[in-house]
Amino acid sequence: MADGRNRLAVLGSPIAHSKSPAIHRAAYRALGLDWTYDAVEVASGELGAFLDGCGGSWRGLSLTMPLKREVVPYLAEQDGVSRLVGAVNTVLFTEGGRAGFNTDVFGAERLLRESVSGTLRHALILGGGATAGSLIVALANCGASEITVSTRSPEKSTGLLALADQLGVALAVGGPDVLPEDLDVVVSALPGTAPLPREFPAAIRATVPLVDIAYEPWPTPIARHWLEAAGGVANNGLGMLLYQALIQVRIFVAGDPERELPGEADVLGAMRSAALGPV
């Protein structure tokens, strides 16, 4: 790995709140790698220029909103998960060009399995952006057979419907007021600063767990709303961030999301401590 490619970064907008630099730096310290990892503000429409400026010292990138779909035309290849979902959150610079991966599905699946006890059959996703596709795959992997997406722009969800069809999942898409019965989990893919999209009945908040992909600021408006109900449970997205970052580190170190890191348990422990600590 002494090939001079020691630069990494997370790109997105806004990005100042990101815990990714702390988590990744902890991993590379634990691995004994003298790599840098920074947070860089890159807004929609600016990604191409940034990629053009990446020289031979760059190893890879993590991507967040609004770049997970914008990056696709700039890639030479993609892994199967990112092709299925239509979103890329990891870029590896290789001799053959830029390779794209999706580690969000792995992170979301681990978070869901830790957050939902019992059978998971019917889920409600709030938000229809790039992360919604990863959540649909993760929910299907956890056994969900029915998924409802609540979004301000249902007409833009054609890709999600096609994805669900490939997975054999019954997907319904509606506006902000849609609220199906017999839910096992509500998953929020809204930005952490997004206002409460609607009022949810106390009976639902008291019995159905909320999994909020956001983690900063915490609690988010919807998490606060959930916790105001007696018995309400709201889980934040730090677990997803941690587990998807672990797979990113595997990719950056070995080029393979399936290959475990040397001393991976210790590396994950260092990453978890960084996630829970200050940025």
Image: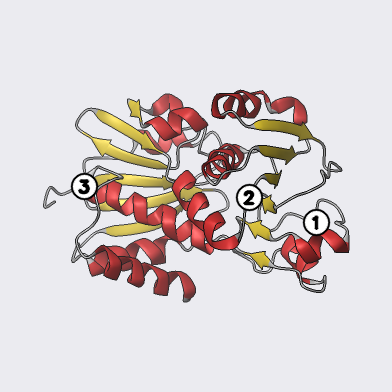
Vertical arrangement, residue 88 with respect to residue 10, above or below = above
Q: Residue at x 52, y 51 (%)?
A: 108
Q: Residue at x 61, y 29 (%)?
A: 164
Horizontal side of residue 26 vs 241, given as left or right: left
Vertical arrangement, residue 28 with respect to residue 55, above or below = below
**Type of amino acid under label 1:** Leu
**Type of amino acid under label 3:** Ala
Q: Nearer the viewer, residue 86 or 171?
A: 171
Please give the label number shown on residue 196.
1
Q: Secondary structure at mark 2?
A: loop
Camera sees residue 41: no
Q: Of the two numbered discs 3 and 2 on the same chain, state the one appearing first in sequence.
A: 2
Please give the label number shown on residue 222.
none
Mark 3 nearby-residue class (10 Å; few <14, some 14–19, many ≥20): some
The residue under label 3 is: 254
Residue 29 position, x and y percent, is 25, 68
The residue under label 2 is: 120
Q: Residue at x 48, y 55 (%)?
A: 110
Q: Spatial distance from mark 1 to mark 3, Cα to Cα?
A: 41 Å
Horizontal side of residue 30 vs 113, given as left or right: left
- Residue 267 appears in which quarter of the rendering? bottom left
Q: Nearer the viewer, residue 278 or 173?
A: 173
Q: Nearer the viewer, mark 3 or mark 2?
A: 2
Mark 2 nearby-residue class (10 Å; few <14, some 14–19, many ≥20): some
Q: Of the two numbered discs 1 and 2 on the same chain, state the one appearing first in sequence.
A: 2
Q: Spatial distance from mark 3 to mark 2, Cα to Cα?
A: 34 Å
Residue 222 position, x and y percent, is 75, 60
Q: Of the two numbered discs 1 and 3 on the same chain, state the one appearing first in sequence.
A: 1
Q: Spatial distance from mark 1 to mark 2, Cα to Cα?
A: 25 Å
Horizontal side of residue 37 vs 134, given as left or right: left
Badge count: 3
